[in-house]
Image: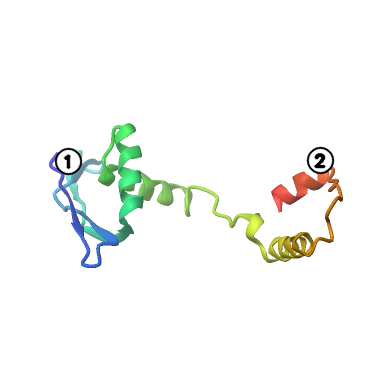
Amino acid sequence: MATRTDFAKAQDGAFSTLMLDAEMHQAYNDSKNGVIMMKTSVQVSFRMDEDVKRQAETIFDELGMNMTTAFNVFAKAVIRTGGMPFKMKVDSFYNAENQRELARRIELYESGATKGQQIEITPEELESYANG
């Protein structure tokens, strides 16, 4: 099975382009006539931050796979699950309500209004802040 992965630095140096070669083939069995057929893969090109690519390659290498294999695994998981194969959500800490409360508390602190005061918070309140 021949594979080739090329990385080309973009002109601005901030991104790398990943080229997945079309030389990869995957055999499958045509159950109608028992003939082994070859599926041809296509070339895919996308841009990614250079540091992210390097970090991902390190992890994929530790898992014993290259970038091509890792992205094929990801694409198949998307197909199998009918969407992203992981839950996507925004960190609730950064929502507008929490940011307003943080700004209010910073203002109180900087004005000296809280000097000498102890802040009390229950474990339940702490948990609710953590979970949004």
Pick the residue in front: 119 or 100. Answer: 119
User: Horizontal and vertical percent for residue 60?
Assistant: 32, 39
Q: Earlier in the sequence, mark 1 or mark 2?
A: 1
- Name the residue type under label 1: Val
Looking at the image, is mark 1 or mark 2 nearer the viewer?
2
**Which of the numbered marks, if any, corresponds to residue 23?**
none
Colour convention: rainbow
Quadrant in which the C terminus is drawn? bottom right
Q: Is residue 120 above or below residue 102?
A: above
Q: For the point 81% across and 47% down, which residue is it?
A: 125
Residue beneath disc 1:
35
- Name the residue type under label 2: Pro
Q: Is residue 48 above or below residue 28?
A: below
Residue beneath disc 2:
123
User: Horizontal and vertical percent for residue 113?
Assistant: 84, 61
Pick the residue in front: 121 or 45. Answer: 121
